[in-house]
């Protein structure tokens, strides 16, 4: 009886903690997200006024991190180090630093995302909250880190199921942190609802019409999964290689971001006058209701990789959504499937291919485009995931059972 009461007590603590983490992180996500959308609208109306100063702002961002960042300058790498038990504390100053750095990156036209900010906000608060508890839980640091990451992702995208699985599977490929399930569920759904109540809108595009899942269609879905997985892997590989190359060629981070920022300003202005700046939500919308060019996905991929490799702040996920959606829209006529469906499949599975996650993209697709299409997302995400399982946009992500081994015959 005493053991059962102890379990009830722990469940109560975990549920209450998830509620608090979700409410706080969802509120911060709403503030961050709404300001970011306002910044995006302002930049799109003043492209020629703002983009020429991208290099100067980049120098300011790097200098800010050098002066006051400390351990927080590691960003997502620090989140992974804490998740793996290699570090103990995420400094609270990481939150204002990453928010301000991302706002400036987007205001002046860098091609970057936003989920990295939300996940870092959630991880930082979850890590701090765990240290305030009057009780000590086994694996407590990882549990509350995962719960915070789930809250951050859910508060920003309002896809709580995908957020839960993303947080549980992203630290180690092939392993789910089930010990964090209860607080992650509470935190994710709370953050999603809080951010929505505070005015942050969710992107949804319900797909219409049925596509028969026969053998021919399944063959096409397998091919799409392989293609989208390769593109996700290409993104991760390019980001890693370019970061290494730029660090070798331009060792001074201030000089590096100044030079690359100047190049980015020219490229972003010449290639579509800011079409490839920012999150890529303009490209996502165009994939379903506007005009897409065959090269949109490739230019968005290249410019996002260049922006992040230079040292600008943000994330990768929303640009990955844009890359996948535009690629899907471009190739839909070639595969003979409805354009919105192929764009939706690309939206979800390129993200999965680049992050080495499987369940998160599966439910991103379902929560954004409709659960009726879950079988289609399952097939495509499966093969996108099979293509990679090694490279990831997260350099400190660990892999278990990363290689298939065939038993040799006698």
Image (cartoon, grey):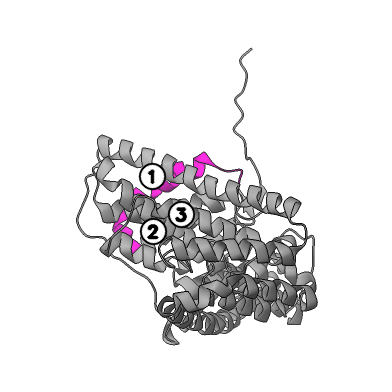
**Residue at the location (44% across, 73% down)?**
158
Which residue is nearer to you in this view: 206 or 304?
A: 304
Q: Secondary structure at mark 1?
A: helix
Badge 3 crowding class, 10 Å Cα cut-off, few under 14, some 14 to 19, many 20 or more, is some
In what quadrant of the picture does the N terminus appear?
A: bottom right
Q: Which mark is residue 299?
A: 3
Mark 3 and mark 1: Cα distance apart in space: 27 Å
Q: Farthest bottom residue?
A: 198
Q: Residues within 10 Å of mark 1 (few under 14, many from 20)?
A: many
The first of marks 3 and 2 along the sequence is 3
Cα gap from disc 3 to disc 2, whole angstroms: 24 Å
Instruction: State the extent of the magenta-drawn residues as a range.
Output: 368-391
Q: What type of secondary structure mainly makes up the magenta span? A: helix
Which residue is labeled 2 in the image? 365
Residue in the picture at 43% in, 81% down:
196
Residue 162: percent from the left, percent from the top? 47, 63
Q: Quadrant of residue 6?
A: bottom right
**Residue 373 lies in the magenta stretch:** yes
Q: Name the side, left or right, on which 408 lies relative to 50.
A: right
Q: Secondary structure at mark 2?
A: helix
**Callout in the foreground (3, 1):** 3
Residue at 46 percent of width and 54 percent of height: 299
> Is residue 372 in the magenta section?
yes
Q: Residue 171 in the image: x percent, y percent?
A: 64, 57
């Amino acid at each position: 009886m005493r053991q059962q009461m102890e379990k009830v007590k722990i469940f109560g603590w975990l549920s209450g903690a998830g509620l608090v983490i979700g409410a706080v992180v969802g509120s911060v996500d709403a503030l961050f997200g709404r300001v970011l959308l306002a910044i995006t609208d302002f930049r799109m109306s003043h492209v020629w006024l703002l983009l020429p100063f991208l290099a100067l702002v980049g120098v300011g961002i790097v200098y800010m991190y050098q002066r006051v960042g400390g351990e927080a300058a590691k960003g997502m790498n620090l989140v992974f180090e804490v998740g793996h038990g290699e570090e103990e504390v995420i400094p609270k100053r990481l939150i204002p630093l990453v928010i301000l750095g991302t706002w400036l990156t987007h205001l002046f036209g860098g091609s970057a995302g936003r989920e990295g900010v939300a996940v870092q906000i959630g991880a930082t608060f979850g890590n701090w909250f765990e240290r305030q508890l009057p009780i000590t839980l086994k694996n407590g640091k990882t549990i509350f880190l995962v719960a915070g990451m789930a809250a951050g992702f859910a508060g920003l995208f309002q896809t709580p199921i995908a957020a839960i699985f993303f947080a549980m599977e992203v630290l180690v490929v092939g392993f789910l942190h089930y010990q964090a399930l209860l607080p992650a569920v509470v935190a994710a759904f709370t953050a999603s609802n809080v951010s929505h109540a505070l005015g942050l809108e969710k992107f949804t595009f319900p797909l219409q019409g049925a596509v028969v899942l026969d053998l021919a269609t399944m063959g096409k879905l397998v091919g799409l999964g392989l293609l989208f997985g390769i593109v996700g892997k290409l993104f991760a590989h390019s980001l890693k290689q370019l970061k290494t190359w730029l660090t070798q060629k331009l060792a001074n981070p201030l000089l590096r971001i100044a030079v690359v920022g100047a190049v980015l300003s020219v490229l972003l202005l010449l290639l579509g006058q800011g079409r490839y700046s920012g999150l890529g939500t303009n490209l996502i919308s165009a994939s379903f209701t506007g005009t897409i060019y065959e090269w949109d996905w490739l230019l968005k991929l290249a410019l996002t990789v260049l922006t992040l490799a230079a040292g600008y702040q943000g994330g990768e996920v929303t640009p990955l959504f844009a890359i996948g959606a535009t690629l899907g829209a471009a190739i839909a006529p070639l595969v003979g499937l409805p354009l919105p469906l192929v764009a939706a499949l690309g939206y979800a599975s390129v993200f999965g291919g680049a992050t080495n996650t499987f369940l998160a993209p599966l439910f991103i697709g379902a929560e954004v485009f409709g659960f009726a299409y879950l079988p289609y997302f399952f097939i495509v995400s499966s093969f996108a995931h099979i293509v990679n399982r090694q490279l990831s946009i997260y350099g400190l992500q660990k892999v278990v059972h990363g290689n298939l081994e065939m038993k040799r015959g006698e």
